[in-house]
Image (cartoon, rainbow, N blue to C red):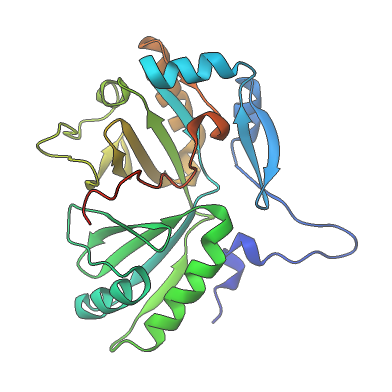
């Protein structure tokens, strides 16, 4: 059975209509002042009307960006095959608790037999196809599934990002337990999720899209208590969170 219907980028124009993908909480983002533009086939929050305030939040406190546009591709295979596919596509290896950057994507090991590859919207299709091709040549049962439509992501960035997480999350995100490039599944805001530390002050939180509105309210409330605010992707910079220097090279 084909799972192509799960991939938003495979939607084809028909009858003069060109499909554009949007966040399932776009209304909540707009209510918070988001300016929406189309980028790479997605309607995304590019800003919230005050670029200076957004930049200040990222420099002094915490800014939170909604990034449901990120492509999330899941690989499930025997551990040896997971290593083979990731090495072939990313040119890297991964180990539990630590993500790696390669092929313009974050490679996040959830279990020895399960890895998530997270990339920007422009690269999702190419990455999925590369993973499918590599999985076809690996031993054992290997499945590659596009989870973009079922998961969403928020990025919390700034010097108080970790403090913001502490207000709704019991995960230990201190340097000892969560260094840069650390990756940790767990309960965040009482919802199963995963946290990736992309850089010193930038964290990506991935979770089920069905909880997005509740989680947005929770995360923004925590940020505002610390002087933070929502920010758009223009203030955030790299949507995929590419590291300035790969820490685990």
Relative to 133, is 163 above or below? Answer: above
> In this rendering, does residue 216 appear at all?
yes
Query: Residue 220 appears in which quarter of the rendering?
Result: top left
Residue 165, given in percent of the width and then of the height, sits at: 29, 27
Q: Quadrant of the C terminus?
A: bottom left
Query: Residue 76 appears in which quarter of the rendering?
Result: bottom left
**202 with respect to 97 (left or right):** right
**183 with respect to 175 (left or right):** right
Residue positioned most to the right: 16
**211 with respect to 233 (left or right):** left
Residue 240, given in percent of the width and then of the height, sits at: 45, 47
Q: Residue drawn 17% across and 40% down?
A: 179
Q: Residue drawn 65% across and 30% down?
A: 27
Relative to 29, is 90 above or below? Answer: below
Of 9 and 84, the residue lying toward us = 84
Relative to 235, is 118 above or below? Answer: below
> In this rendering, does residue 61 appear at all?
no
Count of number-bearing discs: 0
Of 77 and 190, the residue lying toward us = 77
Q: Quadrant of the N terminus?
A: bottom right
Residue 248, given in percent of the width and then of the height, sits at: 21, 53
Residue 174, given in percent of the width and then of the height, sits at: 15, 31
Q: Residue drawn 54% across and 55% down?
A: 149
Of 228 and 59, the residue lying toward us = 59
Q: Residue drawn 80% across and 64% down?
A: 13
Relative to 92, is 149 above or below? Answer: above
Residue positioned most to the left: 176
């Amino acid at each position: 059975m084909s799972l192509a219907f799960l991939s938003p980028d495979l939607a084809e124009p028909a009858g003069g209509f060109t499909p554009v993908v949007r966040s399932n909480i776009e209304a909540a983002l707009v209510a918070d002042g988001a300016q929406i533009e189309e980028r790479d086939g997605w309607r995304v929050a590019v800003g919230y009307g005050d670029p200076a305030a957004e930049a200040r939040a990222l420099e002094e406190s915490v800014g939170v960006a909604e990034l449901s546009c990120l492509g999330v591709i899941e690989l499930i295979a025997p551990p040896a095959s997971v290593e083979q596919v990731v090495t072939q596509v990313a040119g890297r290896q991964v180990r539990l608790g630590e993500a790696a950057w390669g092929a313009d994507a974050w490679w996040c090991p959830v279990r020895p037999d399960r890895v998530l590859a997270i990339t920007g919207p422009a690269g999702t299709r190419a990455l999925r196809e590369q993973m499918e091709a590599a999985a076809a040549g690996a031993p054992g049962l290997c499945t590659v599934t596009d989870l973009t439509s079922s998961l969403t992501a928020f990025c919390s960035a700034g010097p108080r990002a970790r403090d913001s997480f502490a207000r709704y999350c019991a995960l230990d995100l201190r340097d000892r337990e969560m260094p840069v490039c650390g990756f940790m599944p767990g309960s965040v805001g009482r919802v199963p999720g995963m946290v990736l530390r992309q850089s010193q002050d930038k964290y990506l939180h991935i979770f089920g899209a069905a909880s997005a509105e509740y989680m947005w309210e929770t995360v923004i409330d925590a940020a505002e208590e610390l002087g933070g605010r929502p920010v758009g992707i223009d203030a955030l910079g790299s949507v995929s969170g590419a590291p300035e220097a790969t820490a685990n090279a």
